[in-house]
Amino acid sequence: MKKIIVYIFLLLLVSCNNPRNNSLKEIEDRNLTLLEYDYCSKKNHLHEFDSVTFVPLETNERSLISSITKILYKNETYYIFDKVQAMIFLFDDNGSYITKIHNIGSGPGEYADISDFDIDADLNIYISSIVGRKIIKYKYPDYKLFTEYKTNATVMEIAVDEKNGKDMGNQYISD
């Protein structure tokens, strides 16, 4: 019996040893380079960037982030998307909490989920909802006023065309 346990232990020990090649894995497409997390975490690559700033975020009952899905930085504000909680948090340049968008529901200006978000040149926030098949534009500065666009398609990702001030998803949306 002891031999079987030792063999099982050794088998597990050997099978769990997964040597990884920590070499840089790159995908270059229109100046986009993806770095493997493991590669970045084990080596110092700070020399590859012009500057790196660590900003500790204010932590209180209103600003608890479960999971960071996406971060955008615009006009001295960090916009942090937490897909797990379906929230967009806003923090200033110093990491102080400003506000959040958290409008879960099925009514006007509300969503069941957030699949993605983006920000236009006027700092309006666009949220796409797969379940609701809609895009909601929350208007700057307080993000209380909104415009809702129904879509005929499932919009997984959204991007704002800064030149034309329009949102682009699976279809073209116009005001």
Image (tube, helix red, strand yellow):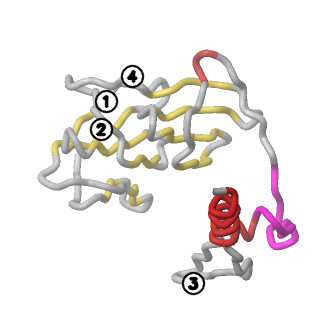
User: For the stretch drawn in magenta, what is the main secondary structure?
Assistant: loop
Q: Earlier in the sequence, mark 4 or mark 2?
A: 2
- Picture layout, residue 60 above or below residue 88: above
Which amino acid type is shown beneath numbered disc 4?
Lys
- Picture layout, residue 64 above or below residue 49: above
Foreground mark, 1 or 2, reads 2
Pointer 2 local density, CA inside 10 Å: few below 14, some 14–19, many at least 20: many
Pointer 3 local density, CA inside 10 Å: few below 14, some 14–19, many at least 20: few
The magenta segment is: 41-53
Q: Quadrant of residue 25?
A: bottom right
Q: Secondary structure at mark 2?
A: strand
Most distant residue in the left direction = 152
Q: Identify the residue under disc 3.
A: 28
Q: Identify the residue under disc 4.
A: 144
Q: Identify the residue under disc 1.
A: 146
Q: Earlier in the sequence, mark 4 or mark 3?
A: 3
Q: Earlier in the sequence, mark 3 or mark 1?
A: 3
Q: Are marks 4 and 2 in contact (CB under 8 Å)?
A: no
Q: Identify the residue under disc 2.
A: 136
Q: Quadrant of residue 107?
A: top left
Residue 77: percent from left, percent from top: 63, 39
Q: Are marks 2 and 3 in contact (CB under 8 Å)?
A: no
In which quadrant of the rendered image does the N terminus lie?
bottom right
Q: Give whichever of 61, 18 is nearer the camera.
A: 18
Distance between the Cα atoms at labels 4 and 3? 40 Å
Pointer 4 local density, CA inside 10 Å: few below 14, some 14–19, many at least 20: few
Question: What residue do we see at 36% from left, 59% from top?
Answer: 164
Q: Secondary structure at mark 3?
A: loop
Which amino acid type is shown beneath numbered disc 2?
Ile
Q: Left or right: 70 with respect to 120?
A: right
Most distant residue in the front direction = 1
Q: Are marks 1 and 2 in contact (CB under 8 Å)?
A: yes
